[in-house]
Each structure stands twice: as C-alpha cells, then as structure tokens.
Amino acid sequence: MNQYLYFLKPTRLGMVVEGPTPVEAEIVSRHFAHLEALTEKGVMILVGRTQNSDESTFGIAIFEAEDDSTARAIMESDPAIREGVMKAELYPYKIALMRK
C-alpha cells in the first residue's frame, strides 16, 4: 500500500474565526464521522488539525491507498470536501519516522 496525505483548509475562514453556521457544523460533524470510520477500517493513519483559529489553520489526513486514483477517491469522499466546506490538496506521502 502507498501512503498519501491530504491537506485541508476551510473555504470560509469565518467558520473557524467566528464559528460555523448550522449547515457547516452538520457537514463538519459528518466529516469527522467519515474520517473516524476510515480510521477504524485501517485506512487512515493519522488525522488532525491545527488549534489556531486564523487564516493559517489547516488539517491533515495521512492514509493508505492502493494507487493515486483510489487515494483521490478517498479524499473526494470526505463530506467536507464534497460539500465545499473545505478544500483539499492530495500528495503522495511517506512516513519516515514514527514513535513507538
């Protein structure tokens, strides 16, 4: 299996600065549940976000996929990306070191 990383940014900065709208909150809830399910299935290796609430905030998802097209399909299945609350960029990735 190959490793990939997708980098997420909110499409509307106000979502993290002022707080999400009810619609954004519901989509982000589904985004989290989706990533949680992929983690439980062994697809996601690590998922998280920065804890700042300004224009530099971002999230990452590091995961395994068979190939580039499968990796892109996994990223695009994320409800936050599909519904335009976040934008994402996909990168081939390889974890070099990880604590035990």
Image (tube, grey):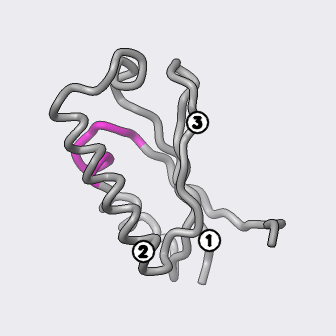
Q: Which residue is disc 3 drawn over?
A: 50
**Element class at badge 3:** loop
User: Disc 3 to disc 2, how far (Cα)?
Assistant: 26 Å
Q: Rounded to the nearest whole Å, what is the CA distance between mark 2 and mark 1?
A: 11 Å
| Residue at 44% in and 45% down | 88
Mark 3 packing: few (<14 Cα in 10 Å), some, or many (20+)? few
Q: Which range of residues does the magenta coloring cover?
A: 79-87
Q: Is residue 25 magenta?
A: no
Q: Quadrant of residue 28?
A: top left
Q: Quadrant of residue 64?
A: bottom right
Q: Amino acid at mark 1?
A: Gln
Q: Position of residue 39 (x, y in %)?
A: 46, 71
2, above or below 56, in the image: below
Disc 2 target residue: 70
Element type at mark 2: helix
Mark 3 vs mark 1, foreground winner is 3
- Compared to 80, does 39 lie above or below? below
The residue sitting at 32% across, 52% down in the picture is 31
From the viewer's side, name the closer residue of 53 and 66. Answer: 53
User: Residue beneath label 1, please?
Assistant: 3
* Residue kind at label 3, given as amino acid type: Thr
